[in-house]
Amino acid sequence: MRKWWIPVTVLGLAGLGALLLSPRGKRALAWLTETFADAPELFLNQSTLQDIERLRVAVDRLAGSLGAVL
């Protein structure tokens, strides 16, 4: 089974490359690009910003305690 990993991987990557170079693949990539361009506005709401701030404070506290130990 081990000797099949490399050929299967190469075949899979070649198939993925062929899909991305096809017209349908290009349309899918264009759609993904347009969709993810608007993603920050969709995900950055007030609760997300509060969570990010809590994580930042926790990381700062952890870094301070590690600095005191070292």
Image: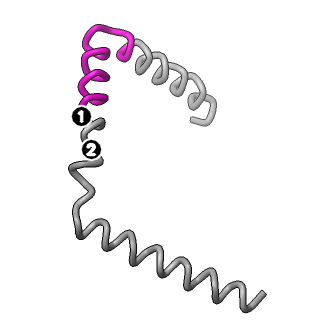
Q: Residue at x 38, y 11 (%)?
A: 21
Residue position for label 1: 35
CA distance for labels 1 and 2: 7 Å
Q: Position of residue 3 (x, y in %)?
A: 63, 30
Q: Residue at x 54, y 21 (%)?
A: 10
Q: Secondary structure at mark 2?
A: helix
Residue position for label 2: 39
Which residue is most to the top?
Answer: 23
Callout 2, which amino acid?
Ala
Q: Residue at x 31, y 15 (%)?
A: 26
The quarter of the displayed image where residue 67 is located:
bottom right
Q: Is residue 31 left or right of residue 20?
A: left
The C terminus lies in quadrant: bottom right
Over which residues does the magenta segment extend? 19-34
The quarter of the displayed image where residue 20 is located:
top left
Count neighbours of disc 2 (C-alpha within 10 A) and say few if under 14, some if 14 to 19, many if 20 or more: few
Above or below for 51 versus 58: above
Q: Secondary structure at mark 1?
A: helix
Callout 1, which amino acid?
Thr
> Are dots 1 and 2 in contact, CB under 8 Å?
yes
Using the image as rendered, state which of residue 24 and residue 43 is in the foreground. Answer: 43
Q: Is residue 63 left or right of residue 39?
A: right
* Color scheme of the displayed model: one colour
The N terminus lies in quadrant: top right
Above or below for 4 versus 52: above
